[in-house]
Image: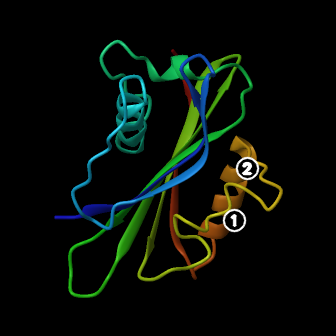
Amino acid sequence: MPGVNRFRIVNFRFDDDKKYIANELFEFDGENTLLNLENGGGKTVILQLALQVLKPNTQLGSRRFADYFKLDSGAAHIMIEWVLDGFTPEYLLTGVCFSKGTDGLRYFTYTHSYTSTNKYDIKNIPVVDAKKQVAGFSEFNRFLRELSSSSKYRINIYSRDRQKD
């Protein structure tokens, strides 16, 4: 059974903008993991973020995912790297990019399969540049589309332009 190897969150604000995850990479190595945070520390938020990669715009209890986003707050990137079953290491990166505009929450999802560290794995994919600027929604979508046309990388993009709240 595939396991979560790593989980990355970029440019996500919550708790009325009091808490901010700029660029965090959690390393689980495919093992069971315990997140030990105090009450209000973000455990439910982190779980809800992980669910977005599987089913974008998923509501958890009374928490609507779209409510986390403010108009034109920039793109948020959420990624899970799965370690797949088999004799040789193989990984599947599943990601989602969100942004909120005047017409609601928009997102696209993507996948990338690989067998070893590369410049587009979960740690290195350029969602944040050297100046710590986060890749925008349209910019990152264009980047992935160009990359997916190359036969060197196994990248697929799945669009869902608008998701009304």
Residue at screen point 35% across, 12% down: 62
Q: Is residue 31 above or below residue 73?
A: below
Residue extending farthest to the front is 38
- Residue 39: image x %, image y %? 36, 24
Foreground pick, 9 / 149: 9
Residue 125 coordinates in the image, percent (x, y): 61, 64
32 with respect to 127 (left or right) = left
User: For this view, does 39 lie left or right of residue 146?
Assistant: left
Name the amino acid type tagged 1. Glu
Q: Residue 23: percent from the left, percent from the top? A: 61, 49
Which residue is identified by label 1?
A: 146
For marks 1 and 2, give the CA distance: 15 Å
Q: Quadrant of residue 3?
A: bottom left
**Mark toward the viewer: 1 or 2:** 2
Reply above or below: 56 against 121.
Answer: above
* Kind of element beneath mark 1: helix
Which element is circle 2 on? loop
In the current view of this chain or complex, which residue is farthest to the right? 131
Tell me the quarter of the picture where residue 153 sits. bottom right
- Colouring chosen for the image of the structure: rainbow
Instruction: Name the residue carrying label 2.
Output: 135
Residue pictured at 37% horizontal, 30% vertical: 38
Side (left or right) of 27 relative to 134: left
Residue type at the position of mark 2 = Ala
Extreme residue toward the left, this view: 1
Horizontal relation, residue 69 to residue 129: left or right: left
Q: Earlier in the sequence, mark 1 or mark 2?
A: 2
Q: State the residue at coordinates (59%, 70%).
A: 120
For this rendering, which residue is in front, 130 or 81?
Answer: 130
Q: Are marks 1 and 2 in contact (CB under 8 Å)?
A: no
Q: From what the image shows, is residue 31 above or below residue 64?
A: below
* Residue 49 in view (yes/no): yes
